[in-house]
Image: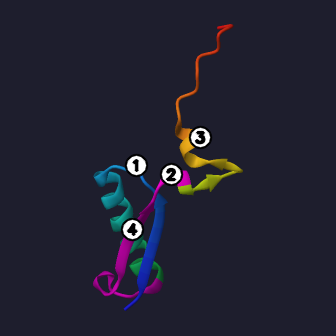
Amino acid sequence: MPFIQITIAEEHDEQRKRNLLEAVSAAAADATGTPEDAFRVWIVEVPATEVMVGGTILADRRAPRPADPEG
């Protein structure tokens, strides 16, 4: 039985995660010709403070930016 682990940063809502799991499971079955019920797919969430994107911590990228005082 194939295993697929998806690692994502926290803060995705439950419906989005469900959609992701369903889509990955269906795509894997389609791509391999293996029945979908043979796959085990799960999500591992990591804190946004432990993910870097393009040299910036994801939590910092997600933080609201202060308003420009010069407007």
Q: Assign the N terminus to one quadrant of the image.
A: bottom left
Is residue 32 found left or right of 35 in the rendered image? right
Label 1 belongs to which residue?
Answer: 11
Report how far apart the C-alphas of labels 2 and 1 lie in the structure: 8 Å
User: Could you say whether the residue bearing mark 2 is in a helix, strand or loop?
Assistant: helix
Residue found at x 42% / y 54% = 10
Query: If you read the primary sequence from the N terminus, does the residue marked by circle 3 or circle 4 appear first?
Result: 4
Position of residue 9 measured from the top left corner of the image (x, y, whole percent): 48, 56
Position of residue 61 measured from the top left corner of the image (x, y, whole percent): 59, 40
Label 3 belongs to which residue?
Answer: 61
Query: If you read the primary sequence from the N terminus, does the residue marked by circle 1 or circle 3 appear first?
Result: 1
Residue 42 among magenta residues = yes
Report how far apart the C-alphas of labels 4 and 2 lie in the structure: 15 Å
Of the residues shown, which amino acid type is indicated by label 3? Answer: Arg
Of the residues shown, which amino acid type is indicated by label 1? Answer: Glu
Span shown in magenta? 32-49
Callout 2 touching callout 1 (CB < 8 Å):
yes
